[in-house]
Amino acid sequence: MLYAAKCCWPGVTPADLDHIADRAAVTGLDPGTGTLAYLGCLLSAADDLVLCLFCGPSRAAVIQASDRLGIPRARLMDSAWPAPQGRRAKGPSDDPPLDRSHHRQSAPFPASRAAW
């Protein structure tokens, strides 16, 4: 199930989100490594809004993971990412594990997700 942790995060920077991604990698929350995965964030800096995306088996598991990552979650929303007509939506298990050795600050959301 896809979840979005809505965060009202004044002053958040891409570097802050990189730290979240790094902590997720260290704690085994990369896509393809288990049943719970941190997928990345969408940042709307002008609105102090961050949506952190997770794929997980339950709300409780995602709440625990977001707390461990230090995400200031105001709300957890059940979400859906519909695939274009005639195409199957990919899930975290469809992607190989991420190589963070060349992680880019400007793209905290894994590039492989752009093809969803």
Image: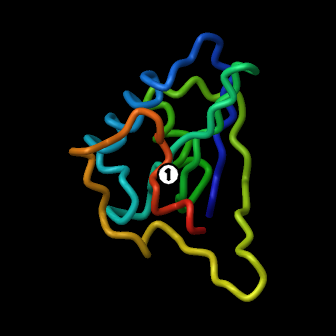
Outermost residue on the left side: it is: 101
Outermost residue on the top side: it is: 11
Instruction: Decide: is 46 above or below 6.
Output: above
Mark 1 neighbour class, 10 Å CA radius: few under 14, some 14 to 19, many 20 or more: many
- Residue found 69% across the figure and 29% down from its top: 44
Instruction: Decide: is 24 above or below 9.
Output: below
Q: Which residue is mark 1?
A: 39
Q: Quadrant of the N terminus?
A: bottom right
The amino acid beneath tag 1 is Leu
Instruction: Decide: is 73 above or below 48.
Output: below
Residue 5 in percent (x, y) is at: 64, 39
Name the residue nearer the viewer: 107 or 78: 107
- Residue found 36% across the figure and 63% down from its top: 34
Left or right, 6 with reference to 109:
right
Asked which quadrant contains residue 87, the reply is bottom right
Residue 6 in percent (x, y) is at: 69, 34
Name the residue nearer the viewer: 3 or 50: 50
Asked which quadrant contains residue 33, the reply is bottom left
Outermost residue on the bottom side: it is: 86
Circle 1: element type: strand
The tally of labels here is 1
- Residue found 76% across the figure and 21% down from its top: 47
